[in-house]
Image (cartoon, rainbow, N blue to C red):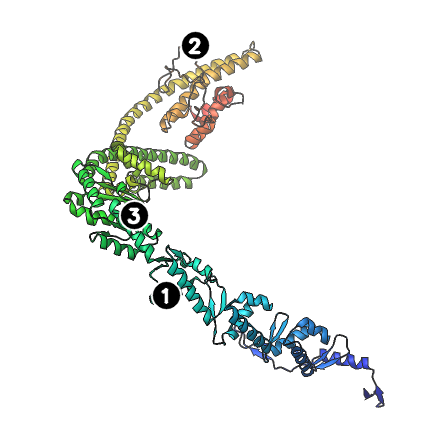
């Protein structure tokens, strides 16, 4: 290449330098297709548009071996010649190998021109429109000979993607007037000739005309090599039926793959069997008829012609005399005997509950007197029972009141016990609260007031209706036959849910209770009985409290008198013991024995007296504590009676809590602190601990004579 150097003198550059210069200029975009940037508005900020440019394709292309330089136009010309030389189909890999240029550059150039020229770029395959046209003409010749070809077969033969074949090739083939596309029910596409449609029609016609038994449409499709196109086969059968070329019935239903064609000769044969069955059994279900290939329309037509009085229901047909008369006799007998009757045996399997109800209420009841209309028909999960009005009145008069009374007593007792339990719990909580703050005491007072209001509203808010299981059990005990029917139902259905007034499918007995027994009056009677029993219990409690108050006052006065004597007696014995301990001739061992004897005798006796009084005053349950290790209490001990100052000894008291139901024994000192309010429980627990660990359950510490007396003086004297 000629040029001038910096001094202005002519100069020469080498071929390699020129090639390097071209490469640099290409990288810098001097040979790119100039495309204006597109301004794309930003939805969030219209004042700051985003500028984007498409990928530029170089107009000057340098081969990988650097031996050739192509302009874009020259490359496309050579590429087209190569494509035509390969009959309109070539791979990108082969193009790259021949031109020795970058793979991505080649793909971008071909992709760009494929939208403007008659070229398809399918993956790494390059095809021309002419190639597709030529292949489609060849395919037309093939289909003309075989009459049918699937798209998947074509894609496999041509080694092309199925989607491309389905979109492009099918659209091109449909330009032929004698070729059309059909799609099977499984999504498979076919290319067929018009002649093949006629061929299939003739084959279907021949198969069904020769049929003597019901034929599945899917089987017909397989036989004519049209297995997946069930809809197409159905259309052809319907076309043949409309044209009078077939004598039969097509049953499609909701699932076309279960479609069935029944020839008339078979229907006539089965219709005769159905009429014989109908005359013998007095019924027939449409389900049974469909299993033999007879349509509902054909069956109804056949039976009404055979017996114009036949009763046509939704899913079944009944004889006007056979079953109707049997049902009439059974229901009439139950009315006169004031009992119930199980009608399930008159109905075959497959008869829906709606048909059972229609048959009995619209065809049987009108034949009976008014007593049938006042009874109750229960149909539940295949079971059909009729309860006469007389039986219903017996249950409501003789059974239900006793059940309600028993339930009311139990429920009222539960409510009363719950009320007392909550009151005791509030007392317990109040005890803890008193140790924390006065604010907590006020809060618990509010809770207590709320509880008082709850006691009155509790009668209304609690579930007042007796459980359905109690009602059903009482009825079952009285009517053993009804109990057996319910038991059989439970075994057959394997019922796992607990019956309730709102649960369905629990059996005929529970259904009877839900429909017949439960009503507004029944619920009112239950609630009224509970309130009456609650009033009775409340009145009894008030009387007991009044009597208890008088007794409490008497005991309180007796304790005050006896407490003075007990304190004086305690002081005398304490001085005597202290004198003996401090005597010069008393050694340490003797002094220790004297202290232990005094604490275990006089000390525990006084502690028990004070403890029992506090338990009585704060209404703590008597069985909360025991004071004898062997469980046998002293019959002569009474905390409000004066002590016997003439006695020479004391029976030892041992404080403990009886064993609970969970076989656990509680710490008595902790229970004292928890169950008695304020400092009362704490003071009593300290008093017992100072008597020594051998005087209460779980104790380990040694008793202290002086501290015990000091504690008594500070808290009692």
Foreground tag (1 vs 3) = 1
Q: Is residue 224 above or below residue 375?
A: below
Q: Name the element at disc 2.
A: loop
Q: Earlier in the sequence, mark 2 or mark 1?
A: 1
Q: Is residue 655 found left or right of 155 in the rendered image?
A: left
Q: Is residue 103 above or below residue 75?
A: above
- Circle 1 packing at 10 Å, graded few (<14), some (14-19), many (20+), is some
Q: Name the element at disc 3.
A: loop
- For marks 1 and 3, give the CA distance: 35 Å
Q: Disc 2 designates what residue?
A: 648
Q: Disc 1 designates what residue?
A: 240
- Circle 2 packing at 10 Å, graded few (<14), some (14-19), many (20+), is few
Q: Disc 3 designates what residue?
A: 351
Foreground tag (2 vs 3) = 3
Q: Earlier in the sequence, mark 2 or mark 3?
A: 3
- Circle 3 packing at 10 Å, graded few (<14), some (14-19), many (20+), is many
Residue 234 at x, y percent in the picture? 40, 63
- For marks 2 and 3, give the CA distance: 94 Å
Quick check: marks 2 and 3 in contact, CB under 8 Å?
no
Q: Residue at x 55, y 74 (%)?
A: 136
Q: Residue at x 41, y 23 (%)?
A: 610
Residue 183 at x, y percent in the picture? 47, 66
Residue 12: numbered disc: none
Q: Is residue 330 above or below residue 561?
A: below
Quick check: marks 1 and 3 in contact, CB under 8 Å?
no
Task: Compare residues 583 and 308 and report the one nearer the observer.
Answer: 308
Residue 54 in view of the camera: no
Q: Is residue 53 above or below residue 183?
A: below
């Amino acid at each position: 290449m000629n040029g001038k150097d910096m001094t202005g003198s002519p100069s020469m550059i080498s071929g390699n330098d020129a090639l390097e210069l071209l490469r640099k200029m290409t990288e810098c975009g001097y040979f790119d297709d100039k495309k204006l940037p597109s301004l794309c508005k930003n939805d969030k900020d219209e004042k700051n548009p985003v500028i984007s440019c498409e990928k530029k394709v170089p107009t000057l292309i340098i081969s990988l071996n650097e031996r050739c330089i192509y302009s874009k136009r020259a490359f496309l010309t050579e590429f087209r010649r190569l494509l035509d030389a390969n009959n309109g189909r070539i791979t990108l890999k082969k193009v790259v190998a021949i031109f020795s240029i970058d793979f991505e550059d080649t793909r971008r150039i071909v992709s760009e021109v494929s939208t403007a020229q008659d070229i398809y770029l399918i993956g790494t395959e390059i095809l021309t429109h002419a190639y597709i046209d030529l292949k489609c003409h060849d395919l037309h010749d093939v289909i003309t000979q075989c009459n049918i070809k699937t798209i998947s077969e074509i894609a496999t033969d041509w080694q092309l993607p199925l989607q491309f074949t389905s979109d492009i090739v099918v659209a091109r083939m449909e330009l032929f007037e004698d070729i059309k596309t059909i799609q099977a029910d499984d999504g498979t596409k076919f290319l067929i000739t018009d002649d093949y449609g006629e061929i299939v029609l003739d084959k279907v016609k021949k198969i069904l005309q020769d049929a003597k038994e019901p034929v599945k449409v899917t089987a017909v499709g397989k036989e004519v090599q049209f297995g997946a196109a069930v809809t197409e086969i159905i259309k052809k059968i319907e076309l043949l039926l409309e044209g009078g070329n077939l004598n039969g019935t097509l049953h499609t239903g909701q699932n076309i793959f279960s479609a069935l064609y029944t020839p008339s000769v078979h229907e006539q044969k089965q219709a005769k069997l159905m009429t014989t069955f109908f005359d013998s059994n007095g019924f027939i279900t449409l389900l049974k008829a469909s299993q033999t290939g007879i349509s509902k329309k054909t069956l109804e037509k056949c039976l009404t012609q055979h017996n114009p009085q036949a009763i046509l229901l939704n899913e079944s047909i009944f004889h006007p005399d056979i079953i109707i008369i049997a049902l009439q006799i059974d229901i009439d007998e139950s009315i006169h005997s004031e009992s119930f009757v199980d009608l399930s045996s008159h109905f075959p399997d497959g008869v829906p509950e709606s048909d059972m109800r229609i048959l009995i209420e619209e065809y049987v009841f009108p034949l009976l007197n008014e007593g049938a209309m006042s009874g109750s028909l229960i149909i539940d999960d295949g079971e059909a029972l009729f309860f006469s009005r007389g039986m219903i009145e017996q249950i409501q008069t003789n059974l239900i009141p006793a059940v309600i009374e028993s339930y009311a007593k139990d429920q009222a007792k539960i409510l009363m016990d719950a009320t007392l339990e909550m009151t005791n719990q509030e007392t317990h909580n109040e005890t803890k609260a008193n140790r924390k703050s006065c604010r907590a005491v006020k809060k618990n007072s509010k809770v207590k007031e709320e509880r008082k209001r709850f006691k009155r509203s509790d009668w209304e808010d609690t579930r007042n209706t007796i459980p359905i299981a109690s009602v059903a059990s009482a009825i079952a005990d009285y009517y053993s036959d009804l109990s057996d029917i319910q038991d059989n139902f439970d075994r057959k259905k394997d019922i796992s849910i607990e019956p309730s007034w709102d649960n369905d499918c629990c059996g005929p007995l529970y259904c009877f209770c839900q429909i017949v027994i439960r009503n507004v009056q029944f619920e009112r009677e239950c609630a009224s009985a509970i309130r009456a029993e609650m009033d009775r219990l409340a009145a009894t409690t008030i009387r007991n409290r009044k009597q208890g108050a008088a007794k409490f006052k008497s005991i309180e006065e007796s304790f005050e008198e006896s407490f003075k004597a007990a304190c004086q007696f305690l002081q005398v014995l304490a001085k005597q013991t202290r004198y003996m301990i401090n005597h010069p001739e008393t050694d340490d061992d003797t002094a220790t024995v004297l202290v232990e004897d005094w604490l275990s005798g006089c000390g525990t006796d006084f502690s028990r007296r004070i403890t029992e009084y506090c338990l009585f005053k704060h209404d703590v349950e008597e069985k909360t504590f025991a004071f004898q290790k062997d469980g046998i209490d002293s019959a002569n001990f009474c905390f409000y009676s004066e002590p016997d100052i003439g006695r020479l000894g004391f029976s030892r008291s041992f404080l403990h809590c009886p064993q609970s139901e969970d076989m656990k024994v509680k710490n008595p000192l902790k229970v004292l602190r928890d169950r008695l309010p304020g400092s009362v429980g704490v003071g009593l627990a300290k008093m017992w601990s100072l008597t020594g660990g051998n005087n209460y359950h779980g104790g380990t510490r040694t008793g202290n004579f002086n501290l015990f007396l000091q504690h008594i003086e500070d808290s009692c004297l």
